Image: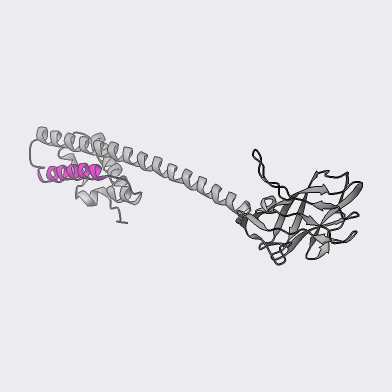
């Protein structure tokens, strides 16, 4: 920053010299006060608050030039001196007004900047207090069915239901044997199946169905259906939520107390599609984030 100097030193005028063209002591004091204002609002200060004071600078230079010329013309008549003094005073007044406007504009812009900084600080504090965004993982899903009848090999003996068709699959797939439905990502999965039952002889029989995870029966998961009579069809639908790890597999197990009770399929007709023996849908949209 440039150092501001006293107006008398900058202009090289003394009170005696000012008295040569100013009529009385009061005019001399006012003249000195105006120069004090001009020094206080000089372009050095204006530049430090980063305002556009080009016009004020030009006006100040003009005023100072007239004052310098005035100092050199001390020998001219009082009337000419009064005119030039008045012109100089007018120029300084304009400088004071223009610079005041510039300073007011600078103050307004500074207040706007401070308000924006305050808003930014509040937003940053809010981010620091908020939990980090949760990462959404790609959905895993699969749909499988079987188009063949599946009969029990023996009564009261668990047997896994198999699948021979994958409809859609993303991260959920059939294993070997094809009774195993494997997931490749940890999460909570929804398993929902529908089984078409049939009885091929008279009398009644019981059908049980439940899930296994990694070869272990899921506790409290069994369902029981009693089917009566020859060619008596019945649809069984059951759903589960399982919390699985990557590479876990699930199987749908069944057992019967009568060998004529079976998981059956039926062909399409002229007005409806074929009936699979089982349809299974799997998805992890219950817990899509980790």
Q: Name the residue nearer the viewer: 260 or 62.
A: 260
Q: Position of residue 270 (x, y in %)?
A: 64, 39
Quarter-of-image position of residue 252: bottom right
Q: Position of residue 147 (x, y in %)?
A: 70, 53
Q: Main secondary structure of the magenta part?
A: helix
Q: Position of residue 28 (x, y in %)?
A: 23, 38
Q: Is residue 80 above or below residue 144?
A: above
Relative side of 79 to 189, left or right: left
Q: What residue is shown at x 77% (from left), y 58% (from top)?
A: 161
Location of the N terminus (image quadrant):
bottom left
Q: Does the segment drawn in magenta span residue 125? A: no
Q: What residue is shown at x 59% (from left), y 49% (from top)?
A: 126
Question: Which residue, as the protein is rendered here, is positioned at the far left?
Answer: 76
Res. 140 visible in picture: no
Q: Position of residue 80 (x, y in %)?
A: 10, 34
Q: Name the residue nearer the viewer: 215 or 42.
A: 215
Q: What residue is shown at x 84% (from left), y 49% (from top)?
A: 200
Relative side of 265 to 166, left or right: right
Q: Which residue range is magenta in the image?
A: 51-77
Location of the C terminus (image quadrant):
bottom right
Res. 189 visible in picture: yes
């Amino acid at each position: 920053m440039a150092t501001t100097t006293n107006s008398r030193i900058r202009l090289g005028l003394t009170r005696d010299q000012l008295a040569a063209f100013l009529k009385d002591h009061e005019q001399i004091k006012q003249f000195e006060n105006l120069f004090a204002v001009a020094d206080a609002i000089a372009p050095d200060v204006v530049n430090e608050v980063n305002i556009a004071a080009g016009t004020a600078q030009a006006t100040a230079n003009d005023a100072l030039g007239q004052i310098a010329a005035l100092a050199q013309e001390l020998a001219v008549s009082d009337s000419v001196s009064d005119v030039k003094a008045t012109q100089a005073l007018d120029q300084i007044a304009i400088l004071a007004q223009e610079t005041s406007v510039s300073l007011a504009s600078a103050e307004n812009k500074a207040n706007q900047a401070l308000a924006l900084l305050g808003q930014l600080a509040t937003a940053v504090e809010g981010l620091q207090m908020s939990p980090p965004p949760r990462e959404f993982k790609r959905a895993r899903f699969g749909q499988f069915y079987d188009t063949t009848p599946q009969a029990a090999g023996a009564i009261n003996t668990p047997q896994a239901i198999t699948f021979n068709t994958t409809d859609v699959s993303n991260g959920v797939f059939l294993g070997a044997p094809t009774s195993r439905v494997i997931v490749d990502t940890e999460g909570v999965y929804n398993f929902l199946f529908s089984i078409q039952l049939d009885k091929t002889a008279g009398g009644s029989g019981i059908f049980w169905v439940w899930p296994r995870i990694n070869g272990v029966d899921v506790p409290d998961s069994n369902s029981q259906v009693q089917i009566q009579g020859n060619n008596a069809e019945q649809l069984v639908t059951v759903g589960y939520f399982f919390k699985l790890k990557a590479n876990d597999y699930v199987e749908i197990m069944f057992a019967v107390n009568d060998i004529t009770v079976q998981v059956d399929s039926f062909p399409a007709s002229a007005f409806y599609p074929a009936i699979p023996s089982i349809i299974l849908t799997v998805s992890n949209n219950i817990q899509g984030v980790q």
